[in-house]
């Protein structure tokens, strides 16, 4: 008999908007389930703390937008904060380049 994982309940999560400079070129990554996503690291800037590295993760059409970014470009991205081996912005959507 197969055991299936329980689906996560959908709860309201706060979205965050961050500004930063791309420090690593985007990478195309395949998940264990076969879904394709794109990741890229930025040096996020904040008025409350010193700059810090932040990983952006995007899926589907947003992943294509993320792959178009180049190292050194400044971007504004929005998404939800998560913790996975360090902070990351998941479901990232590029607002401006």
Image (cartoon, helix red, strand yellow):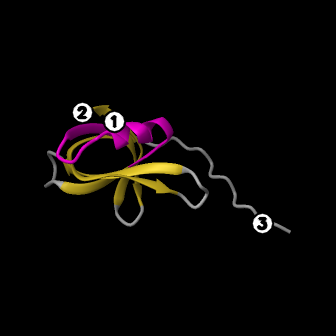
Residue 96, compared with residue 56, is above or below; it is above
The kind of secondary structure element at disc 3 is loop
Q: CA distance from mark 3 to mark 1?
A: 37 Å
At a point 13% along the width and 55% down the height, the residue shown is: 50
The quarter holding residue 78 reads top left
Q: Position of residue 16 (x, y in %)?
A: 34, 41
Which numbered tag is attached to residue 9? none
Label 3: few (<14), some or many (≥20) within 10 Å?
few
Give, as a single range, the part of the protein colored magenta: 57-77
Determine if the magenta segment contains residue 75. Answer: yes
Quadrant location of the N terminus in the rendered image: bottom right
Mark 3 lies on residue: 3
Pointer 3 with pointer 2, Cβ within 8 A:
no
The vertical placement of 16 against 97, above or below, is below
Give the mark nearer the N terminus: 3 vs 2.
3
Q: How far, Cα to Cα, is label 2 from label 1?
A: 7 Å
Determine contact: label 2, label 1, CB under 8 Å: yes
State the SS at label 2. loop
User: Residue at label 2?
Assistant: 97
The image quadrant where one finds the C terminus is top left
Direction from residue 35 to residue 74 in the image, left or right: left
Identify the disc placed on residue 94: 1
Q: Could you say whether the residue bearing mark 1 is in a helix, strand or loop?
A: strand
Q: How busy is the neighbourhood of tag 1: few (under 14 within 10 Å), some, or many (20 plus)?
A: many
State the separation of the CA atoms marked 3 and 2: 44 Å
């Amino acid at each position: 008999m197969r055991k299936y994982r329980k689906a996560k309940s959908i709860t309201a999560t706060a979205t965050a908007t961050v500004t930063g400079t791309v420090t690593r070129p985007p990478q195309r990554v395949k998940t264990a389930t076969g879904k394709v996503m794109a990741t890229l690291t930025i040096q996020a800037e904040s008025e409350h703390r010193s700059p810090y590295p932040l990983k952006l993760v995007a899926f589907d059409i947003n992943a294509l937008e993320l792959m178009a970014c180049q190292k050194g470009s400044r971007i504004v991205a929005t998404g939800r904060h998560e913790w996975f081996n360090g902070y990351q912005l998941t479901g990232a959507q590029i607002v401006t380049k």
